[in-house]
Image (cartoon, helix red, strand yellow):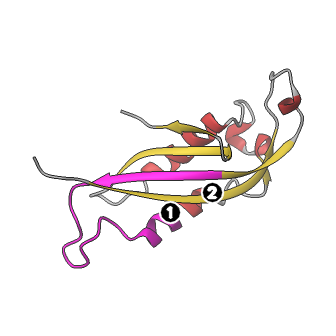
Amino acid sequence: MPGKWKLTITQEFSASHQLRHYCGKCENMHGHNFGVEVVVEGDTLDPKVQYLMDFKELKNKTKAVLDRLDHTHLNEVECFKEINPSSENLAMFIYRNLKSAMPENVSLVEVSVSENNTSKATYWED
């Protein structure tokens, strides 16, 4: 059975949000330095450089998605005007916007979003 490789990168963005219908402090506007972890995989290395993909390229593609969220009030970003900008929905948003940007030989595995060092939400599609 042939092997596979996984690459993982982490990035951050800063934003405020409010969780509608929360019935607690998080319903008030507050901010986070959100942590984002992106995992990709593949079974074919570039024949010349012998890597799955350049970490720099993966970071740039992720940054392009995160730039749409960074230093915003997430509830005012178009896709979060109706749905809550929870960590779960942020992970799904990032995943779905990043998936189509992957090179042909690389598959997006999952995206995790954390609001602090002790909790994270992970989204993936089968």
Q: Position of residue 116 (x, y in %)?
A: 70, 46
The residue type indicated by label 2 comes to: Leu
Give the residue number, with chain letter if any, for mark 1.
Answer: 61
Disc 2 from disc 1: Cα separation: 9 Å
What label sits on residue 66 in the rendered view? Answer: 2
The relative height of residue 84 versus residue 113 in the rendered view (above or below) is above
Of the residues under marks 2 and 1, which one precedes in the sequence?
A: 1
Q: Position of residue 114 (x, y in %)?
A: 64, 44
* Highlighted magenta segment, given as a residue range: 35-60
The relative height of residue 96 versus residue 19 in the rendered view (above or below) is below
- Residue at the image point whose x is 60% and y is 45% from the top: 113
In the rendered image, the residue lying farthest to the front is 118
- Residue at the image point whose x is 82% and y is 47% from the top: 31
Question: Quarter of the image holding residue 24?
Answer: top right
- Residue at the image point whose x is 59% and y is 52% from the top: 36
What label sits on residue 70 in the rendered view? Answer: none
Q: Residues within 10 Å of mark 2 (few under 14, many from 20)?
A: many
* Mark 2: secondary structure: helix
Horizontal side, residue 34 vs residue 22: left or right? left
